[in-house]
Every structure is written in structure tokens, then in C-alpha cells.
Image (spheres, rainbow, N blue to C red):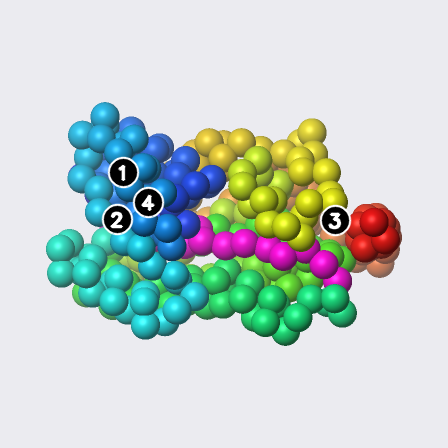
Amino acid sequence: MNFNNKTVLITGASSGIGRAAATQFAKKGANLILVARKKDKLEQVAKDLKKFNVSTLICDCDVSDKSQVKKMSQLVLEKYESIDILVNNAGFAIYGSVSSLTSEEIESQIATNYLGMVYCIKNFLPSMLKKKSGHIVNIASVAGSFGLPGIASYCASKFAMLGFSEGLKHELKGTGIGVTVVSPIMVRTNFFDHPSFKKMPKYSPTSLSAETVAKAILKASNSPRLEIIVPSIVRVAVWLKSTFPYLINPILGSAFKKQLKNTEKN
């Protein structure tokens, strides 16, 4: 796909995957709308993108807040009328057992990871439908296919994202608007900076760079597929879990529960 002069909105754009995606789109000549909670970090990203000679608009917005998303979308649509690509990337996790997390900690993950996506889609989809073109890219996780001890609420938010995306894709068939989910394995970003992860090893040897996922996002922006798993070999694991859950679930559950117990002991 030629991204030159396309208008791309990315949530969670101040760091990690969002920032890397903004850079990749800018290299291709896209105009960017950068959305995140921290304005100072967004300003730095916009400054770094100046060398690509693309238009950037920064919007400080907490996507878990419905009213903030509405205000942000109004600002964007006043300037651009519509966007070509919506990348719902904002998200975070809090590590811990369901019994140890507060209800508010669980709700906060659902609010940002899942409802934030819903709010953005609800506000930008009408203009996409009007011009009969666009693509929605939702950044989920392989955790959207595996319910794992220690991150149950995070998994739930990504399961929800995947289910919502599949239903929406069916609804939008024939409208000119695509929906694709990008589901990576562990990525080397500040995702694990949350204090709840401090007793855990940060990254596995198989973890991905943010740039690798960003390139998958560009691919997803012009893909007819529902889901792109990164790396693609992990699709085998998802297939095995779906086909032989009675074999795979006990193995995964035991391994991750052991990690959770060790973490809660220390």
C-alpha cells in the first residue's frame, strides 16, 4: 500500500510499539496523529519525525475516558474530515493473581486495552463509512488466544479485542473498510516497567523489537486478514492450543502458575 499522504492515527504513540509504528509510517510519507496521555512525550516523538517532512498532530488523551476520546476525535475530524488508518495500540498490564489485584486494577486494564479501542472506533468509524474506505488495526497479543495465570485480566482484554474485531470485520464486509488484529508475542518495550513486574525477568530470548511489530502494523494496514500473529510461527502454538486444549492448557497453566507463585512468595 502507498502510505504517502495517508492520514494515520495511532494511540499509545508516545513510546514502544506506537512510537515505532509512527516512525515506519512517517518513512512512507503518511501524515500522523499521535495520541497518548503524556503531551511532553508526544512532542518529543513529533520532533523526531520532523526529518521525514510529514504533517503531525499531537493529542494528549486518555483513551479509557469516553469524553476525552470524543473531544480528541472532534479535534482530529475538524482538521482532516476523516482518517485513513486507525491504529488502536494503547494498552498496559498489571501482573498479579486475580485474588491479589483490586477490582479497580482489573477494570483499568479493560478500560484502556478494550474500551479505549471501542471508543476510538465508535468516533472514527462514521467518517470512514461515509467515504467508504479505511482500515482499523487493533494491537492485541498472543495473550488474546491463551488465558494465562498472572495476567488473566490482560488476557481478557485481548480476548475481547479479538472477538470484537472479528464481529466488526463481518459487519463491515463490502463497505471498503478493513479490520486486522496484530498479535505479537513479548515485545521489548516499557510495557514491563509497571511496578507489578519488578520481580520478574523482563524479556525472554524470543522477545521482539518494537520495530518488528511496527512493520507488521504497516502490513496489517492493507491486509484482508483478520489476524497477523508475530512471529508467524507462533500461529502453530495457537492452532495446537485450539485443537488439543486438553494437552496444551495444563502445560501452559502449570508453567505460568509456577512463575506466579514464585513472584508472590518473594
Instruction: Give the alpha-carbon distance from disc 4 to disc 2, as whole Å.
Output: 10 Å
Residue under label 3: 240
Please, is residue 109 above or below residue 142 in the view? below
Count of numbered labels shown in the rendering: 4
Residue under label 1: 46
Is 79 inside the magenta-drawn segment? Answer: no
Marks 3 and 2: which is nearer the front? Answer: 2
Q: Residue 63 occupies which quadrant of the picture?
A: bottom left
Which segment is the magenta one? Answer: 84-97
In x, y percent, where is residue 137? 40, 51
Question: Residue 1: which numbered mark, if any?
Answer: none
Quick check: 241 left or right of 8? right
Q: Give the residue displayed 60% in from the left and 50% down from the top.
A: 194
- Indicate the amino acid at tag 3: Leu
Q: Disc 1 vs disc 3: Cβ atoms closer than 8 Å?
A: no
Marks 4 and 2: which is nearer the front? Answer: 4
Residue under label 4: 40
Instruction: Give the alpha-carbon distance from disc 4 to disc 1, as whole Å.
Output: 10 Å
Quick check: 259 left or right of 147? right
Q: Give the residue displayed 35% in from the left and 33% down from the top.
A: 24
- Indicate the amino acid at tag 2: Ile
Question: Residue 58: which numbered mark, if any?
Answer: 2
Quick check: 253 left or right of 119? right
Marks 4 and 1: which is nearer the front? Answer: 4
Query: In the rendered structure, which disc, 2 or 1, sits on the residue that comes first in sequence?
Result: 1
Please rate how many residues cluster around mark 3, counting C-alpha atoms within 10 Å: few if below 14, some from 14 to 19, many from 20. some
Marks 1 and 3: which is nearer the front? Answer: 1
Q: Residue 19 occupies which quadrant of the picture?
A: top left
Instruction: Give the alpha-carbon distance from disc 1 to disc 3, as whole Å.
Output: 42 Å
